[in-house]
Amino acid sequence: MDTDGSSAFLEGVRAKGLVGSVPETKRILIVDDDRVICEQLVWALSDDYEVHAEATVDRALGVARSIRPHLVMLDLSLTGSPGETEEGFELLKRLIQRDPSVKVVMVTASDDRERAVRAIELGAFDYYVKPVDLDELRVLIRRALYVQELERTSRGISEDMGEPARLAGLIGSGDAMRGALELAKAAALSAAPVVIVGESGTGRRRFAETIHGMSDRASLPFVTAAGGALSGEAVEREIFGRVQHRTIEPGWLERAAGGTLFLRDLDRCAESIVERLRGYVATGVFSRIGGGEPVRPDVRFMASMESPVAAGPTASRHGFLGAHIIEIPPLRERGEDVLLLAREFLDRLSGLRGRPSRGFGKAAVRALLSHGWPGNVTELENRVRSAVLSNRRGAIAASDLGLASEDEGGKQTLSDARHELERGMVAAALRRSAGNVSRAARSIGVSRPTMYDLIRRHGLKPVDYKCRNGGTGRGGSGAA
C-alpha cells in the first residue's frame, strides 16, 4: 500500500470533514486462517462495523451469501504458505462475481507486492501489508466504503432531475454525469490516482483540471502530458527524465512536483511504461533513464483513456492502486443535455464577443438534437464558437452551426417540428431515467398516464432504455 498517499488522504479527509461520513453500519468480512489476526481485527473494528471472520473459502462464501458484506479483508495466502495464493485469487474472483459492488482489500506479506498488484488488476480495491497498522487500516476502510457509496449512488444519483448538477466548470443533468461529478468531488479530497475513461472530446482534461483545482494542490503545477502522441521510448524519457553526459533532464513527473501530472491516452502507452508508472504510484520513487540517484517527487497522478473494453490489456481499470475510476458518457447519449451545453457555450462565447445571446432557432435546435456528435463536447463547443463568429442576423441558425445543407425552413411543417421536438424530449427523459417511466414523467413535468400516452404516440419502448451500458442510465448528461 502507498503509505505516503494514505497519510495524505487521512490529512485531507480530516481537514474536509470526510471521516465519519459513512452513516449506516457497514458489514465487514475478514477471511484469514490466522486466528490471532482475526481476533485482533474483530476486536479493533467491532465498535464501528458489523464484523464477521472466517478461515476457509467455503465458510467465507457461505457468510458472504447470507450477510452480503460491504467490504472483505482477504488474506492472499489462506493456506498459511506465503507462496500459495491461488485459493485467495479464486475467492476474490467469486466474491466480485457474486457482488460487483463489494470492496475487497487484500492482506499480503511485505515481499508479495507483485501478487497484490495482480489482485488489484482482478478487481480488488487495495491491499495492506502485515503486520497491520490499525490507524492506516481504518483510513483505508473508510476510503473504500466511501467510494463504494458514491458508486452505488451514481447508479441512481437523484430522484430530482429538475436542475442540472454543477461542479466548477462541469455540468450535467443525467444519472451518469451526476455520478461522475460526485466521484470527481470525492477524488478532489483524496491523494489516490484518478483514471478518467471516455471518448476523445468528452471533457476528460476538464475533469482532471477540476479535480486538481478543488484539491489541496490547486496552487501547485498541473502538467498535461500527451502519452499517446510519442513513441514508447520518447514517452518513457519524457515522463521519467534522463541523465545524459552527467546532465540531468527532468521529466514530466519532476516538473509536476507537488502538483498533478495528467497523462493523456494511458491506454496507448507501452506496457513497460504502464508498469513503471504502477511502480511509482505504489512506492513514490523512480529512476531517470540512464541511472543516477532515485527520485521522489510528490505528484498526484491522473490519466485518461478510451473505454477499457476496447483498449486492451494495458488499459486495466485496476492497474493503479486505489485509483478513482470516473467514466464520462459520450455526447450522443446525453439527449437534450446537448441543448443545455449549447446554451451554456452560446451565453459564454457571446459575452466574450460583447454580443447579446439571442438563442437558437427552431431548425438549429432540431439539428443539435439529431446530430451524432462524433467529436463530443469539443465538437459542440467549436460549432457554437463558429456560429457566434459568423452570425449577424439574430438567433443562431442550423447553417451557422454547419449542420444544415438546405434552406432553414426546409419542407417541415410546424406540426412536424412540434412532433419531432416532443419525441426527442420523451426519448431523452427515458434515456436519463434508464427506462423508469415515473421518473421520466417527473423530469418533463407530466403525469404518468400522460407519459404512457406520449410513449405510445411516438412508438417508443421503455425497455429499450433499461440497463444500458453496463446497468446505468447513461443518457441526458453533459460536461462543459
Image (cartoon, rainbow, N blue to C red):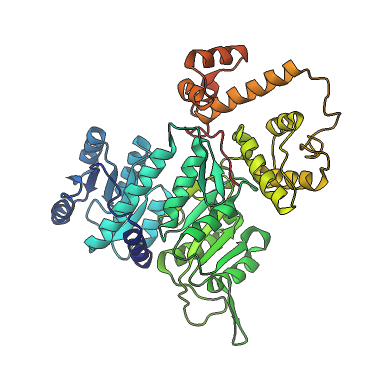
Q: Residue 39 versus residue 18: which sits nearer the camera?
A: 18
Q: Is residue 242 left or right of residue 31?
A: right
Q: Is residue 381 left or right of residue 476?
A: right
Q: Who's the residue at 51% across and 69% down the image?
A: 220
Q: Camera-side residue: 139 or 11?
A: 11
Residue 134, image x, y percentages: 22, 60
Quadrant position of residue 188: bottom left
Confirm whether residue 78 shows in the render: yes
Residue at 74% across / 52% down in the picture?
A: 354
Is residue 86 at all visible to an observer of this figure?
no
Which corner quadrant holds the N terminus? Answer: bottom left
Residue 360 placement, left or right of 422 = right
Residue under the point 49% across and 36% down: 175
Question: Is 264 placed left or right of 349 in the picture?
Answer: left
Q: Quadrant of residue 418?
A: top right
Q: What is the number of callouts on the image?
A: 0
In front of the other: 151 or 70? 151
Q: Quadrant of residue 370?
A: top right
Q: Position of residue 374 (x, y in %)?
A: 69, 40
| Residue 62 location (% of width, % of height) | 22, 35
| Residue at the image point whose x is 34% and y is 62% from the top | 15
Is 427 placed above or below 274 here? above
| Whether residue 132 is situated above or below residue 338 in the rendered picture | below
> Residue 83: x and y, percent?
30, 58
